[in-house]
Amino acid sequence: DIAYLGHDSGLKCDLDAIDNLYYEVGMRRAVDRRMAVAVLERVGVAGVMRQAVRQMSAGQKRRVAFARVLLCATPLWILDEPASNLDVAGQALVGTLLDEHLAAGGIAVVATHHALHLHAGTLQALQLVTSEVFGRFSARRHACRVQLFIRSRVGVELRRARLAGVPLHGG
């Protein structure tokens, strides 16, 4: 099982935060109101949990989407720009939640342009570079930071990727 947080929140705009969690997570596992309220409190949106998502700020939506990741309770998180639309406190919360997940033995693959200040385990960062051609003669290189956060077996997984012919850059 994986939990995925895309660049878009993936929330149903006409539902409130609790109903979004029931809908999304409830298809994977049993969820009760107490669990939903607790995770929404944890991410700092308890005050708006009965408000329609369409009425929430972008940062509040991001926090609800992260609550969904937490409530899924999966060992593998795949996160695309998890700190986007968050204020400084929200960005720190993302770091704390990632630290807790990693300390509990979880794995996170994160694509981000933000620095994530993490303390748990052995962290590996891979830099993927792509080229795009514009017009007939010009090419521009783009870099994206993809970070693989894992407490163990990183070396094994990186060696497997290299053997499979995947070019890896970074540390």
Image (cartoon, helix red, strand yellow):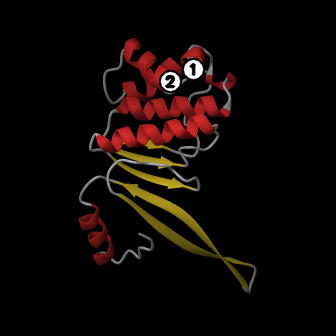
* Labels 1 & 2 near each other (Cβ < 8 A): yes
- Mark identifier at residue 20: 2
* Vertical position of residue 90 compared to residue 38: above or below: below
C-alpha separation, residue under disc 1 versus residue under disc 2: 6 Å
Element assignment for label 1: loop
Give left or right: position of 31 versus 152: right
The image shows residue 64 at horizontal and vertical percentages of: 53, 28
Element assignment for label 2: helix
Residue 3 in sight here: no
Q: Residue at x 57, y 35 (%)?
A: 90
The image shows residue 82 at horizontal and vertical percentages of: 53, 44
Q: Quadrant of the C terminus?
A: bottom left
Q: Residue at x 55, y 49 (%)?
A: 81
State the image quarter where residue 100 is shown.
top left
- To which residue does mark 1 refer? 15
The image shows residue 10 at horizontal and vertical percentages of: 55, 36
